[in-house]
Image: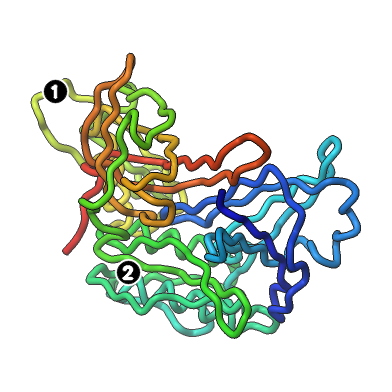
Amino acid sequence: MPAYRYRSWHALTGDLLAADLPLSQVDFGLALNAAGSFSGRLEPRFAHLLPTQLDPGNTVITVERDGTALWGGLLWSAEPEGSVYALEASGWGSYLHSRHDLHGNLGGRGPYVHADPCTVVRDVWAYAQSQPDGDLGVRVDATTSKAKAGTITEPYRTDWWDAPLLGDVIEDMTKLEGGPEWTETTDWSNGRPTGRIRLGWPRMGTRRTDLSFTSGINIATTTPVTLDGDAYAQVVIALGAGEGRGRRRAIDAVRNGRLRLEHVLEVPGEKGNDRLAARARTERQARQVLGDVAEVEVIDHPAARIGSWQVGDDVRVSLHDQWSDFDGWCRITGWSLRPPQGKDRERITLSLARADRYHYGS
């Protein structure tokens, strides 16, 4: 049985606070274009660890499996819940949702015209960590892309009087047509955990022919394949900023021999025509896929060992049961892991989406 270890660290100094946290009912994971998640429980007899070793908003939590770091992030909440303390943490990327641009254009790094969104992502982190007591030690990949943020007529800018969330700027970059994707990992540097933002372009991950997930082999349970006509559309109308005749609008449509179905996408804060058009296209492509596998629960198996995949990978999934008969490529959009506890074995849940739902730049 694998050995798990949970430790806490001072977010600013990197000092070790607790070498072995006595947590139970732990569940953690990573996601595509979003911060990872973590939850756990602390028995009342260990309440003395609060707040010296578990100080919300100032503590990093790490998870190790057999000595390998699988997860790291910031503790945000520790609240009594019945007979236990419920702990909630989020990955490194969550930090930017508690930080704002107070100087405008990321301290003069913008405004951006035909800029690589990967550069903007790095600038966001550089600005955040250059402010007093703001250095979390997060590193960002040097990945580049051919996508473009901002135009001559509509530069991408963040104005100080709006105090924009830095996390929203990252989301804007990932929503650009052909924009980059990201996820996060945890490494070690000088004996302390360091967050890494992994950027992928034209995509995160790759098609894995060396891995497979199959009913009766390494898939324990699954959700049925869903067919939802209400969610289908070949026409998407994206509505952006403004009112009345002055409201920004973008329509993305195709004809494919099926009954015409339409969907309205509300993006009230979007002022850029190019970004609005990209949002419409992405939404339309996603809504044209019928038959989706939302998630599967898998076990550690030679066909796909824990840690052998990464967020963004395409994997072959074969489901055959009383409800489903599916065999195709699915993309891992996230995963969560529940360590073994008592008689309960290790449980890994993969969040999936049809691989043909995605279209990448080159």
Q: Which residue is mark 2?
A: 149
Give percent across and percent down for residue 319: 29, 28
Secondary structure of the residue carrying numbered label 1? loop
Q: Tell me what residue is drawn at x 24 percent, y 27 percent.
A: 326
Please indicate whether residue 9 sits to the left or right of residue 217 in the image: right
Count up the numbered dots: 2
| Viewer-proximal residue among 106 and 286 | 286
Q: Is residue 63 above or below residue 332?
A: below
Secondary structure of the residue carrying numbered label 2? loop
Which image quarter is the C terminus in?
Answer: bottom left
Residue reaching furthest top?
A: 322
Give percent across and percent down for residue 16: 73, 75
Residue 93 visible, this angle: yes
Q: Which amino acid, by three-letter code, is at mark 2?
A: Ala
Residue reaching furthest front?
A: 1
Residue 229 visible, this angle: no
Q: Which residue is mark 1?
A: 258
Q: Is residue 107 above or below residue 179?
A: below
| Viewer-proximal residue among 20 and 182 | 20
Tell me the distance, in whole angstroms, between the alpha carbons under discs 2 and 1: 35 Å
